[in-house]
Image (spheres, rainbow, N blue to C red):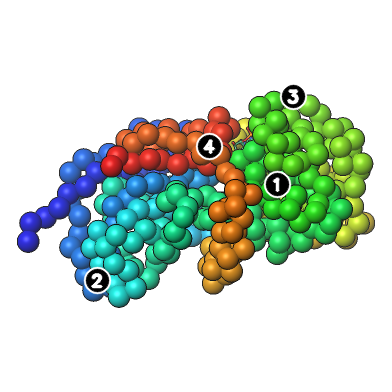
Amino acid sequence: MSTAYTRRYVLAARPATTTEPLEDGVLRYEDHAPVPALRDGQVSVKVKWLSLDVATRGWMNDVRNYLPPAPLGEAMRALGAGVVTESRYPGLAAGDRVSGLLGWQEDAVVEGSTLRKVPDGVPLQAALHVLGISGQTAWLGLHDIGQPQPGETVVVTAAAGAVGSLAVQLAVAAGARVVGVAGTPEKCDLVRSLGAVGCVNYRSQDVEAAIAELASDRVDVVFDNVGGAVLDALLPHLAVNARVVLCGAVSRYDRGGPVPLRNWFHLLPNRVRMEGFIYMDHADRFDEIEADLLPRVRAGELRCQEHVIDGLKAAPEGIQVLLNGSNNGKVLVKLCD
Ligand SMILES: NC(=O)c1ccc[n+]([C@@H]2O[C@H](COP(=O)([O-])OP(=O)(O)OC[C@H]3O[C@@H](n4cnc5c(N)ncnc54)[C@H](OP(=O)(O)O)[C@@H]3O)[C@@H](O)[C@H]2O)c1
């Protein structure tokens, strides 16, 4: 049998620091990498879309994380969506649309049991945002930890982003009064268009003062994607028995390094619960989440903007776009047909 070849990015070296932009040599582009032969239980997938996530930058570092560092010498770890071209796994057949950890490559050979089928009637890439990592994360963080009650006030940070914009929509649907925090006037307009009663531009406004006004000094739930100074500014406004959902900490990739929390004391007298979570710990609930989200997606009630990077070769740009905030929505790489 003749060997097939693919294009891919290999993680060739660990970045020198955990925060700086990627140096040359960390990722190596290969345009003639052999595709492994298919074994029993495996499928080969033509990858059409890749998901770029804040975590992607962290996985390159050799530091303790919720997953081991991405292995050197292999296609860089990433979620992707594509079409099965050949299957030796009984649950999947050629032509099935699937998503899973496919890596930065145009052709992937993976264990069939690690993939999820993409439901009919939605675009393939929805499996990487509203019906995938972004939607699952927003749903789990908001409903399991945040548990907003009708009329309660929910503040969402990075509210125009993929996870944030979905958390805003789910909180509005739950009957909460939602206030967003985002980095530009246009992003704030988007957040308000999703049903938020207000949105604070943390780059141009005093977050602490603006939240006091918009949230009447009574924040029941914080859905936090950023940490650092923005999270700190929200803590003095927490209500008794408030819940702080620690979803992400994108600000820690700032070049200045981590920012200390000055206002942590407010957690104590207000009996606040602050809890982190990792969406992939709850893979056994993805069917339940999909059953809840899919009808709303099909009805057009839940939306997620896409920020599309064209072609595998440009994928590293997407990491910087996420970390400097210039993305508008879910960062996806569209691979060549
Ligand atoms: N816990 C989990 O299992 C899990 C799973 C997936 C994602 N996450 C987390 O969810 C968060 C959102 O991820 P996403 O993929 O949807 O990305 P995203 O929100 O679409 O993009 C990241 C956004 O972060 C904001 N940002 C960047 N630097 C910032 C800073 N220094 N301070 C404040 N905001 C900053 C930018 O928006 P602005 O222009 O508004 O600043 C940027 O657009 C990330 O923290 C990610 O790690 C967690």
For label 1, the crowd category at 10 Å Cα-Cα, with few meaning under 14, some 14 to 19 and many 20 or more, is many
Residue kind at label 4, given as amino acid type: Leu
Q: Which of marks 4 and 2 is nearer the N terminus?
A: 2
Q: Which residue is drawn at 23% across and 63% down?
A: 86
Location of the N terminus by quadrant is bottom left
Residue kind at label 1, given as amino acid type: Val
Q: Earlier in the sequence, mark 1 or mark 4?
A: 1
Q: In which quarter of the image is ligand 1?
A: top right
Q: Residue at x 79, y 58 (%)?
A: 148
Q: How many marks?
A: 4
Q: How far apart are marks 1 and 3 (CA)?
A: 21 Å
Which residue is under mark 4? 322
Q: Which of marks 2 and 1 is nearer the N terminus?
A: 2
| Label disc, if present, on residue 88 of the rendered structure | 2
* Badge 3 vs badge 2, beta-carbon distance below 8 Å: no
Which residue is under mark 1? 168
Please tell me whether residue 259 is drawn above or below residue 154 in the rendered image: above
Question: Residue 218 appears at what percent x and percent y?
Answer: 90, 47
Please tell me whether residue 37 is drawn above or below residue 180 in the rendered image: below
Q: Which residue is drawn at 70% across and 32% down?
A: 188
Location of the C terminus by quadrant is top left
